[in-house]
Amino acid sequence: MSPASAAPASAPVSRSRFIVPVLAFCGVVVAVMQTLVVPLLPHVPALTGSSPGAAGWLVTITLLTGAVFTPVLGRVGDMYGKRRVLLAALAVLTAGSVLCAASSDIGVLIAGRALQGAALAVIPLGISIIRDELPAARVLPSIALMSSTLGIGAAVGLPVAAVVVENFDWHTMFWASAALGLLDFLLVVWIVPESPVRTPGRFDVLGTLGLIAALVGLLLAITQGADWGWTSARTLGLAGGSLVVALAWGRYELRVPSPMVDLRVSARPAVLLTNVAALLIGFAFYANSLVTAQMVQEPKETGYGLGASIVVSGLCLLPGGLSMVALSPVSARISAKYGPKTALALASCVMAVGYVVRFFTSHSLWLIVAGATVVSAGTAIAYSALPALVMQGVPVSETGAANGINTLMRSVGQACCSAVVTAVLANVTFEAAGRTAPTLHAYLLIFLIAAGAALAALVATAFLPTRRPERAKAAGPGTVGGPTSVPAAQEGR
């Protein structure tokens, strides 16, 4: 028996009922980190003596490290223990928060934000632990809640950060982040058991480096293309280089015995189309978060802006976050009764309807909040259904890596959305109140594009193989219709 397998197979009965709440709390805290600095960004150059471009890296770097480390740490968790990797990710989050809290130097802040972003792997790791530890009847509702924390945290993070920025020293929110990270770490140590499921084989170092190189090149080209110029040598060189690396990496992964990403499994329609839908849903969700706060803050002189404060604009997203909490169990019941494919199709339609509402109700604060909440409701159902679809198509021993890739695809969708939103708002403008501002048509165009992404996700969902919910129940305890697991006691056999 390997040392890892000596870890307890399950938590004491008195504490086992807290596993899901603890993991969900970890997910919310990690997701909050993704939007934590958004209200602070306009003030960062003055506070740190840096340029606006350097300040923008406080958001970009978390996107990069989150995208890179999520699938990597998911794979490491599958092989060496999900709980220990979860604890490492929370320790990194805490260290990054302390770095940001203790300094006003832009370089240190960017380094700290990089560490905070790397902890995004907590969410797929939590989903994997839930699948391994819980009886089948509790798996779907629990992973629905865990997956939804990505949207819940993003919605909650903006108003909370806005309140801190307006009323306290800005370092306070990073000290609070460090305290929450430490609390998460201690709760996981106390409550969450180590999973007995392991993936045998050797860690694919070369495949990991290839994946990192391809992702960094692609995401840098997407996130910085607007500043560098979409046809500049730097943007095209990074995009082309990442494509070449990705092709070489794919060929290598098909030949190695224990690949970083099992491309044969990933190419199955059930997995491939789910990941395509995840990218499109990530795009549609992020447009709602990006434009809502900015739109209501636009001055009244623009003819459509409401001149709202940072706090009010952040609070516009709070009802959406609360709806995500309320709807995650509803999504689980839909998935259990009709299948996660039906749930994802319904979610795509709800998101598209939400953007139609936003298209026609852009002058009233309450109607803007209503439209944003409808989009968030659809996101809650989608984010709850996606991991269930992934786990139907992959072995239990690859749950961490597979959900890591799915979370990665959401992040890529968000990066693409950020680039599109930035380009539209920067180019469809007019002069208002003595400054250049986006026109109302710019925002309406974004709503149409986001609705199109949601409908494209619906098309991808329609081509997913149909699977009867009863088959998932027949797969046995702790599974969602996937193949059998590999206990840690068999590791290395």
Image (cartoon, rainbow, N blue to C red):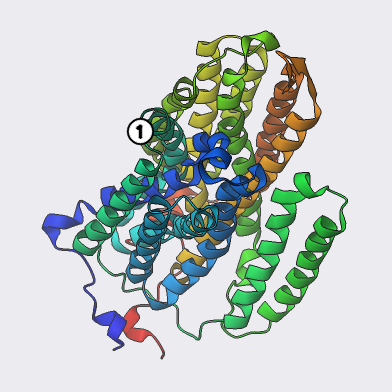
* The C terminus lies in quadrant: bottom left
Q: The N terminus appears in which quarter of the rendering?
A: bottom left
**Which residue lies at the image location 71% right of the left edge and 36% below the top edge?**
422
Relative to 6, is 108 on the left or the right?
Answer: right
Q: Position of residue 101 (x, y in %)?
A: 38, 50
Relative image position of residue 233 (x, y in whole percent):
87, 58
Q: Position of residue 109 (x, y in %)?
A: 49, 53
62 and 97: which is toward the camera: 97
> Which sits in the foreground, 52 or 200?
52
Residues 459 and 58: in front is 58
Q: Residue furthest front?
A: 49
In screen coordinates, is 132 left or right of 286? left
| Residue 299 sits above or below residue 475 on the image | above
Q: Nearer the viewer, residue 108 or 326?
A: 108
- The reply to whether residue 178 is in sight is yes
The secondary element bearing badge 1 is classed as loop
Q: Which residue is mark 1?
A: 168
Q: Is residue 137 above or below residue 372?
A: below
Q: Indicate whether 184 appears above or below 493.
A: above
Task: Kindly identify the amino acid type of the residue bearing the numbered disc 1.
Answer: Phe
Quarter of the image where one finds residue 45: top right
Q: Position of residue 408 (x, y in %)?
A: 58, 56
Q: Is residue 25 above or below residue 360?
A: below
Q: Can you tell which quarter of the image residue 152 is in?
A: top left
| Crowd around label 1: few <14 · some 14–19 · many ≥20 (10 Å) | few
Q: Residue at x 36, y 73 (%)?
A: 81
Q: Residue at x 44, y 78 (%)?
A: 199
